[in-house]
């Protein structure tokens, strides 16, 4: 993650990088919740990650997840309701067609 560590000490925020996302915000390895509590960092169970769950369900891996707003924007471009360059329009139409084919096959 690119955001600096948000752990606050008496001297100010840590601001170290690289960081990982936690509920408290971005934290470096020194200030992760487990490190602050004095526990070793646990590794995530590969079967419980998004990729592992999709594989166990027999679905394809997701390389770049689309946010809801990006999906709506992509569909608006593909339908011609939103102005975009010819290249963007062509790319959006191709992605929309691929998404429809994937939903049809699933």
Image: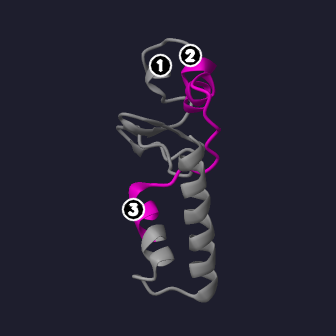
**Rendered view: 15 above or below 75:** above
Residue identified by numbered label 1: 34
**What distance separates the C-alpha of mark 3 from that of mark 2?**
33 Å
Question: Which residue is depicted at the point 63% across and 68% down?
Answer: 94
State the image coordinates of residue 25 (x, y, percent, origin top left).
Answer: 39, 40
Q: Which mark is residue 69?
A: 3
Quick one: label 3, few (<14), some, or many (20+) residues within 10 Å? Answer: few
Q: Which mark is residue 42?
A: 2
Rendering coords of residue 85 (x, y %): 57, 88
User: What is the quadrant of the C terminus in the image?
Assistant: top right
Asked which quadrant contains residue 48, the reply is top right
Report the residue that reaches farthest toward the front.
104
Q: Position of residue 20 (x, y in %)?
A: 53, 37
Q: Residues within 10 Å of mark 1 (few under 14, many from 20)?
A: few
Mark 2 crowd level (few <14, some 14–19, many ≥20, 10 Å Cα):
few
Pointer 2 with pointer 1, Cβ within 8 A:
yes
Q: Is residue 66 magenta?
A: yes
Q: Is residue 4 above or below residue 82?
A: above
The residue stretch that appears in magenta: 44-73
Q: Which badge, 3 or 2, is on the more N-terminal residue?
A: 2
**For numbered disc 1, what is the local secondary structure?**
helix
| Front label number (3 vs 2) | 3
Q: CA distance from mark 2 to mark 1?
A: 8 Å
N-terminal label among 2 and 1:
1
Instruction: Say whether residue 63 is left or right of residue 16.
Output: right
**Local SS, label 3:** helix
């Amino acid at each position: 993650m690119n955001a600096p560590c948000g752990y606050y000490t008496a001297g100010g925020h840590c601001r170290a990088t690289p960081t990982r996302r936690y509920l408290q915000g971005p934290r470096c390895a020194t200030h992760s919740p487990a490190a602050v509590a004095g526990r070793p960092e646990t590794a995530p169970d590969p079967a419980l990650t998004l990729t592992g769950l999709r594989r166990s369900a027999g679905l394809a891996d997701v390389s770049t997840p689309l946010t809801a707003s990006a999906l709506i924007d992509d569909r608006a471009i593909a339908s011609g309701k939103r102005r975009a360059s010819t290249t963007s329009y062509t790319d959006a139409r191709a992605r929309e067609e691929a998404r429809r084919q994937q939903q049809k096959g699933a």
